[in-house]
């Protein structure tokens, strides 16, 4: 097996590696450190303040920040339905296991 080693994509902040397997197939692995995204989301959540503050209910806000690798996993799990169905996306974002992807205290 030949490997390209880990490369860095600066636009997505993901590391990737291309492996050429002995049977002629290729494998692409990606790696993303989600900790900086989660820490930024926590900071944005804390800075959001009270969800009932005047103007917060009507103004547009970034409701979530999802790491690319997580988004790709969700797309694969749902056969890309999550990209077309806002209710399905809301279900994933409102799941307590995914709370650190949200940047507002409100349900989506």
Image: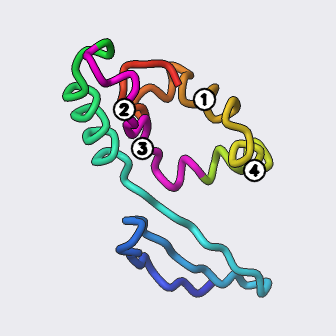
- Asked if the residues shown at circle 3 and circle 4 are in contact, with their CB atoms under 8 angstroms apart, the answer is no
> Label 3, on which residue?
65
Q: Circle 1 — which element?
A: helix
> Label 1, on which residue?
90
Q: Circle 2 — which element?
A: loop
Looking at the rendering, the stretch of residues picked out in magenta corresponds to: 53-71
Q: Closer to us: mark 4 or mark 2?
A: 2
Q: Nearer the viewer, residue 98 or 49?
A: 49
Q: Nearer the viewer, residue 35 or 94?
A: 94
Q: CA distance from mark 3 to mark 4?
A: 18 Å
Give the colour scheme of this rendering.
Answer: rainbow
In the rendered image, residue 69 lying in the magenta stretch gets the answer: yes
Residue 61 location (% of width, % of height): 37, 36
> Is residue 16 left or right of 82 when viewed as pictured?
left
Query: What number is the disc on residue 55?
Result: none
Q: Nearer the viewer, residue 86 or 69?
A: 86
Picture quadrant where residue 74 is located: top right
Residue 100 location (% of width, % of height): 39, 31
> Label 2, on which residue?
59
Q: Residues within 10 Å of mark 4 (few under 14, many from 20)?
A: some
- Which residue lies at the image location 56% right of the left edge and 22% below the top edge? 95
Q: CA distance from mark 4 to mark 2?
A: 29 Å
Q: Residues within 10 Å of mark 1 (few under 14, many from 20)?
A: few
User: Mark 2 or mark 1, which has the lower sequence index?
Assistant: 2
């Amino acid at each position: 097996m030949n490997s390209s080693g880990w490369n860095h994509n600066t636009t997505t902040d993901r590391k990737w590696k291309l492996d050429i397997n002995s049977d002629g197939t290729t494998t692409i692995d990606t790696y993303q450190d989600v900790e900086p995204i989660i820490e930024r989301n926590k900071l944005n959540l804390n800075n959001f303040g009270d969800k009932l503050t005047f103007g917060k209910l009507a103004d547009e806000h970034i409701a979530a920040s999802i790491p690319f690798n997580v988004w790709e996993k969700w797309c694969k799990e749902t056969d890309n339905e999550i990209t077309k169905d806002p209710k399905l996306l809301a279900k994933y974002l409102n799941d307590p296991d995914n709370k650190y992807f949200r940047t507002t205290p409100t349900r989506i």
